[in-house]
Amino acid sequence: MPDEPRLLPWSGLEGKQSYLITGHHGGPVSRLADAMESTQLDMGRQLVGHALALLPDSPPGDLRYLAERLAEALLDALRIAESRGRRLDRPDESWSRSNS
């Protein structure tokens, strides 16, 4: 059974979604995608911390910039969640074979 294409954490041409189609888990593009997802999530966590510290006394211009960065981080996190959710929806063949 072929693997479901993996939604990658970066956009392709014209902002379109990019996918990895391979049966090989842990290949170089897959590892790069894992590293980028980790970096994006770390940046989102740092941004949330910065937002919580900045919000009480921020001028409107700073708030707009912060809101734009938070929206970008949220879009990254949603893309990662969608990609991981697609992979979780598939039954783990190795588990089902070993437990049958």
Image (tube, rainbow, N blue to C red):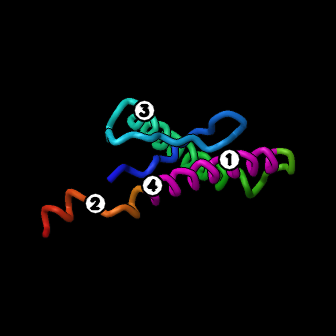
Tell me where residue 81 appears, x and y as whole percent: 51, 56
Tell me where residue 97 appears, x and y as whole percent: 16, 62
- Mark 1 and mark 4: span between their CA atoms? 18 Å
**Label 4 near label 1: C-beta < 8 Å?**
no
Highlighted magenta segment, given as a residue range: 62-86
**Label 2 near label 3: C-beta < 8 Å?**
no
Name the amino acid type tagged 2: Asp
- Mark 3 and mark 1: span between their CA atoms? 23 Å
Q: Name the residue that disc number 1 marks.
A: 72
Q: Residue at x 52, y 57 (%)?
A: 82
Q: Residue 92 carries which label?
A: 2
Please state, as top left, top right, bottom left or bottom right, where the C terminus lies in the image. Answer: bottom left
Which badge, 1 or 4, comes first in the chain's sequence? 1
Report the mark closest to the observer, 2 or 4: 2
Q: Residue at x 47, y 40 (%)?
A: 20
Pointer 2 local density, CA inside 10 Å: few below 14, some 14–19, many at least 20 = few
Q: Name the residue that disc number 4 marks.
A: 84
Q: Residue 29 carries which label?
A: 3
- Mark 3 and mark 2: span between their CA atoms? 21 Å
